[in-house]
Each structure stands twice: as C-alpha cells, then as structure tokens.
Amino acid sequence: MSKRACLGFLAVFSVSIFWFSLVLNTNRPELWTPPGRLLASEYKDLIAKENNQLQQTQSNKVTAVHPPSERLPGLGDKNAIAKESNKLQQKQLDRVPAQHSPPERLHLQNIKDVSVKGMKQSKLKSPNHVSEIRQVVFAKVHKAASSTVQNILLRFALARDLDVFLPIEGPIINDMGATIQPEQMIRHPKGKLFDILCSHVVYNRQILGQYFPDSAVRVAIIREPMQQVLSALHYYATVFPRKTILAGIEKHQKNPFDGYLQHPEDFYQRPDRICAEPGSYISNRMSFDLGFPTHHFLASKENDTKIELFLNKLNQEFEIVLISDYFDESMVLLKRLLRWTIKDIVYLKVNAAELDRNSIWSQKPTLNSQIAKAFRSCNKLDYALYDFFLPIFLDKIKQQSYFKEELLYFKKVKGDIGAFCLNGNLNETLEISASKWSAGFTISAWDCQLMSTEEIEMVEIVRSRQLKRYKDLKKSMI
C-alpha cells in the first residue's frame, strides 16, 4: 500500500473513531439529561401532547359520573371514559419525577404518606381509580363551613357508592361526646370498614379507628374564633334554638352580638361564670369538637402545657386542617391532597345565613380593646387552635406550585356553575371545557340540586341509597 493510501486510511479511521466515541458518550450523565432529570419546563411540552389526546377522548365521550338513583330522577351512569383516562394520566405520572411539580403532577408538600397508603390499600373503583383517595375522616366542626364540606363529601360518596358512617336517624352521631352507640348506627356488613365520615361527632381517633382504616385521610376545618362564635350565636338563636341562648337574647334584643360580647354570662347555663362550661355552642366549641379533654375543663384551658400537647396531637393525626376564612384555597388544597377533580370540589354554599338588612343580626358588633381581650381570654382554646394552624395552612399554600393559577381557574368555574344553577334551564347541561387543571365535565340540573340540598335531606338521600345497597342485612352488623 502506498504512503498516500495509508495516510488516507488513517484519516478516515480517526474520524470514524471520533464520531463513534461521541455516540458512546451520549450515555454519560454529564453529556445528556436522562428522563428523570428533565426540567419542569421540558415536561410541560411532554405532558401537553398527551393531555391533548386525553382532552380529545373526553370531548368525544362525556357522560355523567353519578350512578342511577331510585329516589331522585335524572342521575346518569358512571363515567364511561374513566378507564381510558386513567391510562393516560398514569402514563403521564410515571414519566414525571417526584421532584418536579408541573400542573399534571401537583400534590401537597410535606403531607404525610397516609394518603399514598390509602390509595394502595383501598379497592378503588372508577372514575379515576388509579389516583383518587376515597377514605376520608372529616371532623365536622360547628359553624365553620363544615356543612358545605359535608355536601362535597356526600356527593363524592354518592357518585362512587361509598360507605358513609351515618346514624339510623338524623344527621348527627354525637355532638356532645366521642361515644358511639353501634346500635344507633346504620347497618353495615360485619368486618367491612367505612369510607367517609362527615357527620357531627366529637373527634377521637381511637374510637373512630374501630370504623375506619388507619390509612384514611383525616381532615378538619376551623374558623376565626369570633366569627365562628357570632355565627353560632345567630344559628342557635334562630335556626336551632337553645334555651340558654334564647334567655340571653331576651335580655339583649336590640343588639344580641353586643349583648353577648359585653355580658357573655347572660348566655350560659351558669350565669355566675364569665366563661362557658365545656360543650357550649358559643365558646371554645371548635376545640371541644376536636376532642380537647373536658376533665377539669376550666383549669385545663388555662394550662399552656396541656394546650400545646393537644395541638401537637392534632397536627400529627390530621393530614390537613382547613381554614374556612380561606375556603376556596382550602378546597384546592383538599383536591390536591385527595387527588380529586375540579368537579369533585365545586360547591354552592350550604347552611349559610341569609340576613335581612333591617334584621338585628345584620348589625356589626361594637369592638374595643377591652371587649376583644375579654373575648379572647374566654376563648383561649379556640384562639390557640386557630393561631397554631393558620400559619401551617398558609405555609402549605406557599409551598405549592401553580397554586394561584389553579385557584383562579377554580373560582371562575365555580362562578359559571353558580350562575348556571341559579338561572339555567332544568333541561339543559353546562359543559366545562378541559384545561390543564381539569378534564372536561358536565354539570346537570341534578348536580345543581345536590349542591343546593340542605344537610338533613342530603344525609337522608345518602342513607336511603346505602340502606338499599345492604337491604339483605336484617340488623346492624358493625
């Protein structure tokens, strides 16, 4: 071989080796970005493409998610596209690493793994059976928008034939204690645990643990204490009258709010006490509902060590404590925690007072530093509760990705649904288009009816459905 030919062969061979080494080096981490390390912005395009497929599928196949109802007409079949939708959603989740939070993988930060355990241990059914959490223990606190949350949970249970822990009669299990009488509860297959708790009962994890799995997500809701008390004062004077409260109203007819704030003893069972006994509906009721010990109550509520132990215990047992003063924010956080859909959390206000401008109850209370200090002193427990969980709640929001954007979307959708339910034709439906926050869904007159149903009737609807499901049981088996 000539010298020129040899040099040509070596040149070609060197170039080949160079390009071959580049190909091999593409497998080295420092020279490329494997799927597990893509930036969130790169995932946005990746997921958008698959989302378009999901949206197209859903736009072609839209059905109601509710099973048929024997009691009320208009309830459609379950979501027919759930299976196909879940495949696409799971494919997306599998390709998105946990450290990134684009819209399609939003979840609460610093939430315990209980929700994940619940998903694994529950035998979930469509729709969205892959991801949604279906077992929820909701501590229903008085006059803190808890009836609206209850309506959301009961609608969720109806749509999926879940088992709700309900009394045989009425909407309340026990709002004066944690004791539960099995013979007074709805019949249920022996050994089968319940899915949803959303009725009034004083919270006690050990007692409720007999009826719910440890993996159930525990949720509570609280409210700014003075607003909660004044709301309760109005409710138990006008809607569900209590003798002791009515006696106080008689003494302060011109302005009940000022009367209570200036002379709270006139509204208690023990008029010799400036602050109320445990169990009062208008003093420290939120802490009572959440299980603060009632033994030596008046002394205990002044004991900072006992209060701190109580608050830390709640913080360990509850996945989240919602704040009704930030209700829409609470619903978006709840949606992310439970991996629900936008449709699952839309609502119309339930059990909310509508006041006449000329009513004595429309007056604003007269406040000064002395009145505020006295009220805070008597309601020390509830203020400790609120002051403890409000910063935690707000911090959870700060840790969220894309939270403000989803919140604005939720408010808009909620407004559209509210307008439709108020003015819509009963024979029409409202179509909500798919977005990055939600698959498309339909709102019917039946949905409007359920969202506006008052607590007692809503509980009866769920109870009737559940009793029919277990009609062959001759007696309670719990």
Image (spheres, rainbow, N blue to C red):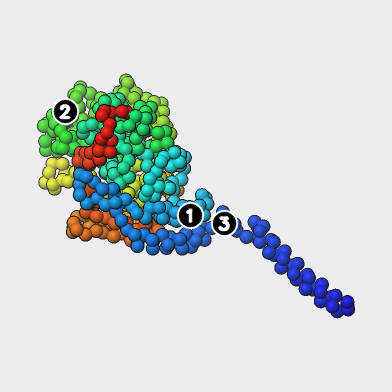
With 184 as the anchor, is 19 left or right in this view?
A: right
Residue 434: x percent and y percent? 36, 60
- Label 1 vs label 3, nearer the camera: 1
Residue, far right: 2
Q: Which residue is mark 2?
A: 244
Element at label 3:
helix
Element at label 1:
helix
Contact, CB < 8 Å: mark 1 with mark 3? Answer: no
Image quadrant of residue 278?
top left
Image quadrant of residue 80?
bottom left
- Label 2 vs label 3, nearer the camera: 3
Earlier-in-chain disc, 2 versus 3: 3
Q: Amino acid at mark 3?
A: Pro
Identify the residue at image location x=21%, y=33%: 170
Identify the residue at image location x=54%, y=58%: 39
Q: Which residue is mark 1?
A: 91
Measure the alpha-carbon separation of dots 2 and 3: 66 Å
Mark 3, Cα crowd under 10 Å, few <14 / some 14-19 / many 20+, is few
Measure the alpha-carbon separation of dots 1 and 2: 59 Å
- Label 1 vs label 2, nearer the camera: 1
Measure the alpha-carbon separation of dots 1 and 3: 14 Å
Identify the residue at image location x=68%, y=64%: 23
Above or below, 337 relative to 282: below
